[in-house]
Image (cartoon, rainbow, N blue to C red):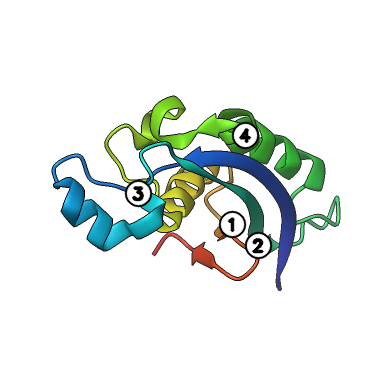
Amino acid sequence: MRVTVSRKAHFNAAHRLYRKDWSAEQNDAVFGKCNNPNFHGHNYELIVSVTGPINPETGYVIDIKDLADIIFEEVESKFDHKNLNLDVPEFENLNPTAENIVVVIWEKIRKRIVPEHDLEITLYETPRNFVTYKGE
């Protein structure tokens, strides 16, 4: 029997969608207002889900406090109130789209979760726009 445990979190961050190797016209055509040279921000909502067997001794799949600590250490403390393009090393040469952000978050958290457990990350950029990554 496998159960999924989920924890919500959030962070506020600014970013700019653009490619350094493209002209201003091409960036504007592809990324539109998200290419604002002065950046723009989002109130990101995050759902981290861990799936695995229930430990018969504790009754947990994962201790939710441990999961909360991992999320804080790997995501909130590094992304919250940051400019993703300028302050987060993973995005120095990676366009901080929602798709790329969710993969970076998954990779950071994956290394802290035991291999027997599956990990799924859902990232809301806005209440209506969100992405999900399962490591596939």
Q: How many marks?
A: 4
Q: Which amino acid does label 1 sit on?
A: His
Residue marked by disc 1: 117
Q: In this view, does 93 lie to the left or right of 115?
A: left
In this view of the protein, which residue sits in the foreground, 124 or 20?
A: 20
Q: What is the CA distance from the residue labelled 1 to the residue labelled 3? A: 38 Å
Residue marked by disc 2: 52
Residue marked by disc 3: 35
Q: In this view, does 61 lie to the left or right of 108?
A: right
The tag earlier along the polypeptide, 4 or 3, is: 3
Residue at 79 percent across and 47 percent down: it is 64
Q: Which amino acid does label 4 sit on?
A: Asp
Residue marked by disc 4: 80
Mark nearest the camera among 1 and 4 is 4
Q: Is residue 57 above or below residue 132?
A: above
The tag earlier along the polypeptide, 1 or 3, is: 3
Q: What element carries label 1?
A: loop
Evaluate if marks 1 and 2 touch, with contact meaning CB atoms under 8 Å apart: yes
Q: What is the CA distance from the residue labelled 4 to the residue labelled 3? A: 21 Å
Residue at 13 percent across and 42 percent down: it is 21
The tag earlier along the polypeptide, 1 or 2, is: 2
Circle 4 packing at 10 Å, graded few (<14), some (14-19), many (20+), is: some
Mark nearest the camera among 1 and 3 is 3
Q: What residue type is labelled 2?
A: Gly
The spot of residue 44 in percent (x, y) is 62, 51
